[in-house]
Amino acid sequence: MDFEQEQRNRVRRIPERGHYDKETIYAIVDEALICHVAFAVDGQPFVVPTIHARMGDELILHGAKASRLLKHIEAGHPVSVAITLLDGLVMARSVFHSSMNYRSAVLFGTGRVLASDGEKLAALEALTEHLARGRWQDARQPTALELNATTVVAIAIDSASAKVRVGPPNDDAEDYALPIWAGVLPVQQQAGAPLPDPKLASGIAAPEYLVDYRRQR
Amino acid sequence: MDFEQEQRNRVRRIPERGHYDKETIYAIVDEALICHVAFAVDGQPFVVPTIHARMGDELILHGAKASRLLKHIEAGHPVSVAITLLDGLVMARSVFHSSMNYRSAVLFGTGRVLASDGEKLAALEALTEHLARGRWQDARQPTALELNATTVVAIAIDSASAKVRVGPPNDDAEDYALPIWAGVLPVQQQAGAPLPDPKLASGIAAPEYLVDYRRQR
């Protein structure tokens, strides 16, 4: 399924890098650990990094009750969410054609606050599992008091697009003869070995999903 | 030097994680490869990932002449820029206290378009060197035509703050007795081995600054 191309989600610069299908867009959303949420108050833009999870066609965000962003969403204002995966630095022979390899998505929508404990728990499970699949069952799950202190919102993804660049540099024809190294420096977000809490009781091994951690791609 | 604490840059949630000194904030700006720029048009927020560089108290962005973001900045509208470094997934015993280790900065300001070729070249050098120190001298530098096709803006950083979380989880006292693994899964953006352009002429070795690539921290 494709999102309709409209004013807010159209990829203008280098339109051949634009994608509007859910498969491409949602794969980026699901792989990324964090997103950046933009909102505007009286013309003043704000942007906040936060964790997210996708449930169907909704993006889940959460935070403390007092969060300015979540109150803003609760009031029905539109937000824009950027999710960006950096894959490499593209070193062209010319500065002009130097670039980056990336997969980025931008989502538009308005949100609703999840009211029932059941909905909130399901969303918190999605957030927890988004970060580390298997963690929800292992961890101590939220109490009624903790649930009450947490605001969870679901943003209906009304509009979205992705922009993707892959591959080697595209230099001007006459520049290929220059004696300049060109190519891609791959970059990737990588996990190291799990670092136990200094207060961890002895005899508790790090779980498999952290020892062998990788993002689904 | 500290930025003044005001409405737009104050860290509200967990204020003890807030920082207002340039040293902390600018170190985050300088280490990160990309930033997310938020702007608003008629109340609709947008957020765009892009590369950046800092020159003193200004943040440099660039793009094609037709860029909506750059035209918006040129028209004098305020922007907000988030720069986020993710350092780890904090696995607390409870879902409620699970978190992330991160260093994030948010900058506020308005921009000006760089007009002279000299200013533009200096800014493009800063952007190039921000990504790979040493590249500017190696690469084929911009022609007059290329300079003319590129818009470069400098955003005066009027207000800013950083938010930083480090260290192990902070669980509720009674949860430390639970038989649940807790700690931090470190995450880091890492570079791989440089991948030569398939069209690279033989006998051109990858430069030192890419073979031994690391971000200043």
Image (cartoon, coloured by chain):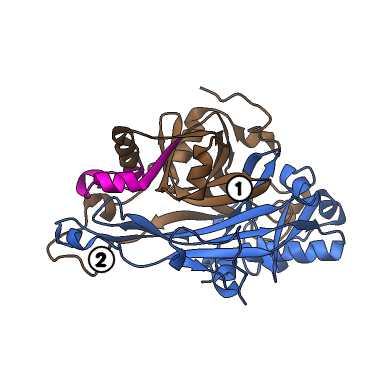
Chain colours: A brown, B blue
CB within 8 Å, label 1 to label 2: no
Percent x, y for residue B67? 74, 44
Left or right placement of residue A187 versus residue B63 in this view: left
Specify the farthest residue to the left: A203
In which quadrant of the rendered view does residue A40 lie? top right
Percent x, y for residue A159? 57, 30
- The front one of A208 and A40 is A40
Neighbor class of circle 1 (other Cα within 10 Å; few <14, some 14-19, many 20+) is many
Residue A183 makes an appearance in the image: no
Residue at 73% from the left image edge and 54% from the top image edge: B62
Percent x, y for residue A168? 60, 47
Q: Secondary structure at mark 1?
A: loop
Residue at label 2? A197
Residue at 39% from the left image edge and 35% from the top image edge: A114
Left or right placement of residue B46 versus residue A122 in this view: right
In the rendered image, the quadrant that contains the N terminus of chain B is bottom right
Kindly identify the amino acid type of the residue bearing the numbered disc 2: Asp
Seen in the picture, residue A31 relative to B28 is either above or below; the reply is above
Residue at label 1? A168
Residue at 35% from the left image edge and 38% from the top image edge: A123
The residues colored magenta run: A127-154
Q: Are callouts 1 and 2 both on one chain?
A: yes
Q: Secondary structure at mark 2?
A: loop
Seen in the picture, residue B90 relative to A39 is either above or below; the reply is below
Specify the farthest residue to the bottom: B1
Seen in the picture, residue B193 relative to A57 is either above or below; the reply is below
